[in-house]
Image (cartoon, rainbow, N blue to C red):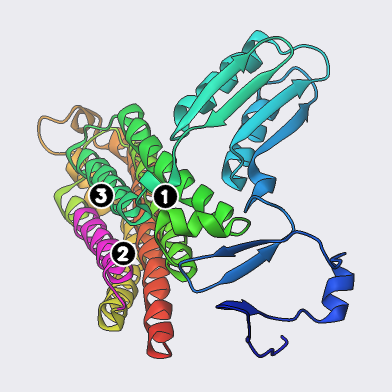
Amino acid sequence: MKTRKLQQVGGGTYTVSIPKEWADEHALEAGMELHLYTHTDGSIVVRTTERDGDGLASVTIDVTGDRPEPVERALVAAHAVGFETVTLRPDGVFTREQRRAARSVVRDLVGTDLLAETDEEITVQHLLDASTVSVRQSVVQLQFTALSVHREATTAVVEGDVSPDRIRERAAEADRLARMVRRHAARSLTSFSELDRLGVSRTELFDYEATARPLRRVAREAVRTAEAAEGLSAPLPPAVADTVEETAGTSRTVVEEATTAVLDGPDAATAHAALDAHDETVETVTAATAALFDASAAPFDGAASRPGDPAASDGGVAADRRGPARAAATSRVLDSVRRTTECGATVAEVALQAAVRAQQE
């Protein structure tokens, strides 16, 4: 950092001198035209390029081979970095599967359009204007979607009516929202004007992106819960179902309160409460998982051998075979609950850091 005094020249024009070593390092010469920008965070930026963030206008990426995965990965990565226009070029020609993959990626990314899809070129353009985007509202919507799909997955497990495909479809919506928040955060690292258009500070955007990532994982845990529940051949016994429902509900409360502490904060008290609830939930889940395997025959075999149960006709042998499998599937459900509450703890830590930072402002 260098310190300079602001000098007034003529009728209201101000000048600031630039250290010679800076000018040499950046190839600045007397008479060169420079571009000055002011930003809402109080920054005044001097650039040799006319456009702020000009490096994000377009990119061309070479794709080798005929597999669809490189096409998908290239488009997703370029979108995350923040490029406005992305052109893919093959080393030969694009296959039908690669073009289909490009269309699928575009459908899963918010605000993108497929401009060209030929054997020689695939071009995707991002059309969403940052000035029309509310990152905060996107995180609010992401929170609602993630918690809603998690609640649906838990209810399906408890009631024995699991539909993983539906859960995956709803989780994909959370994934799209999280990708959009990440894109804006990445663009802000190159373009100062991105923050101006979004109407947020750099620290706010950082906190929103750090919150969106664990919220995205909450939706993914809902998918894992539904997939694990497919291993259950019958509804959970009442005692086990109550434990799953209670701990899953508490984990969602941790996530919700922590996210609120970020969005409406700084709120250190709410963040601490969420972290305390996380610790209690992890202890409950750990104890329930241990008890599940220590006495798996009690909740599962007994329930399976009630009068009228087909397993009772063979003296409970079939129940004995199913008991360990049910215990393993239920353990995976409980493990997903634990990871969900850890997502809430991650968000609570973001909120606590924001509260500490606010004390110094």
The three-letter code of the residue at mark 1 reads Arg
Please state the horizontal and vertical placement of residue 176, each as a whole percent of the image: 43, 39
Query: Which range of residues does the magenta coloring cover?
Result: 243-266
Residue appearing at x 65%, y 31% in the figure: 86
Say whether residue 247 is magenta.
yes
Determine whether 13 is above or below 233 in the image. Answer: below
Please state the horizontal and vertical placement of residue 187, each as a whole percent of the image: 57, 52
Say whether residue 52 is magenta.
no
Determine whether 170 is above or below 137 in the image. Answer: above
Determine whether 291 is above or below 117 in the image. Answer: below
The three-letter code of the residue at mark 2 reads Thr
Residue appearing at x 67%, y 66% in the figure: 46
The single residue placed furthest to the front in the displayed view is 11
Q: Secondary structure at mark 3?
A: helix
Would residue 58 be found to the left or right of residue 305 on screen? right
Residue 144: assigned label: 3
Most foreground residue, 119 or 327: 119
> Mark 2 and 3 residues: CB-CB less than 8 Å, in contact?
no
Residue 216: assigned label: 1
Give the quarter of the image for residue 47: bottom right
- The local crowd at label 1, few if under 14, some if 14 to 19, many if 20 or more residues have their Cα within 10 Å, is many
Please state the horizontal and vertical placement of residue 45, each as a whole percent of the image: 62, 67
Give the quarter of the image for residue 165: top left
Alpha carbons under labels 2 and 1: distance apart: 12 Å
Q: Quadrant of the N terminus?
A: bottom right
The three-letter code of the residue at mark 3 reads Phe
Residue appearing at x 57%, y 78% in the figure: 11
Mark with earlier residue (2, 1) = 1
Q: Secondary structure at mark 1?
A: helix
Q: Which residue is mark 2?
A: 259
Mark with earlier residue (2, 3) = 3
Alpha carbons under labels 2 and 3: distance apart: 10 Å
